[in-house]
Image: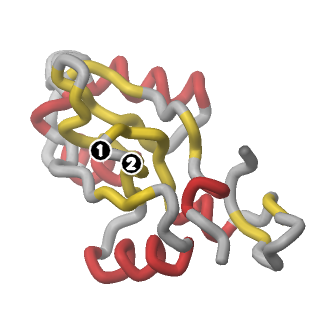
């Protein structure tokens, strides 16, 4: 069984709730990522994705230079344990029609797994035959 920990993205990018949508879009462009976690103090309270930018900013005619990420983020972020299988992650994403899960161990955020991590081959473990997601 391949665990979520083996294919997740470690140290996902985070922004504060007051960050503007324009700043988030610039970070996504510069860092070449499709999602960023949203924190309030040191706690993850949401996620902002490319889909959110399209549907909740452009689609709702919001002004990106003044709109804070807190107004358009998806919240709460569903979680999965790091030792869960990638199949559990796929099932959870499918059930809730989402593309990202926050990976936790002992209630602490350790990473983020996206549908891209599950479909882009780049990991081959010695004991596993799985080929998928991000490398460790």
Q: Residue at x 19, y 37 (%)?
A: 45
Mark linked to residue 104: 2
Mark linked to residue 107: 1
Q: Residue at x 35, y 53 (%)?
A: 51
Q: Are marks 1 and 2 in contact (CB under 8 Å)?
A: yes
**For the residue carrying disc 1, how many other residues have a C-alpha within 10 Å: few (<14), some (14-19), or many (20+)?**
few
Check the picture and name the quadrant holding the C terminus.
top right
122 relative position to 33: left or right: right
Q: Position of residue 91 (x, y in %)?
A: 41, 82
31 relative position to 26: left or right: right
How far apart are labels 1 and 2 at the CA level?
6 Å
Check the picture and name the quadrant holding the N terminus.
bottom right
Outermost residue on the front side: it is 106
84 relative position to 123: left or right: left
Q: Position of residue 116 (x, y in %)?
A: 59, 61
- Callout 1 secondary element: loop
Q: Residue at x 42, y 51 (%)?
A: 103
């Amino acid at each position: 069984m391949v665990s979520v920990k083996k294919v997740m993205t470690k140290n996902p990018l985070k922004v504060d709730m007051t960050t503007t949508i324009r700043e988030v879009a610039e970070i996504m462009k510069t860092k070449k990522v499709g999602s960023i976690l949203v924190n309030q103090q040191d706690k993850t309270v949401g996620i902002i994705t490319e889909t959110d930018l399209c549907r909740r900013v452009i689609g709702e005619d919001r002004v990106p230079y003044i709109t804070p990420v807190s107004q358009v983020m998806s919240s709460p972020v569903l979680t999965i344990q790091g030792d869960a299988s990638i199949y559990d992650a796929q099932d959870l994403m499918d059930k809730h029609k989402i593309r990202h899960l926050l990976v936790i161990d002992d209630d602490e955020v350790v990473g983020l797994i996206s549908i891209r991590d599950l479909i882009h081959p780049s990991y081959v473990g010695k004991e596993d035959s799985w080929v998928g997601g991000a490398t460790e």
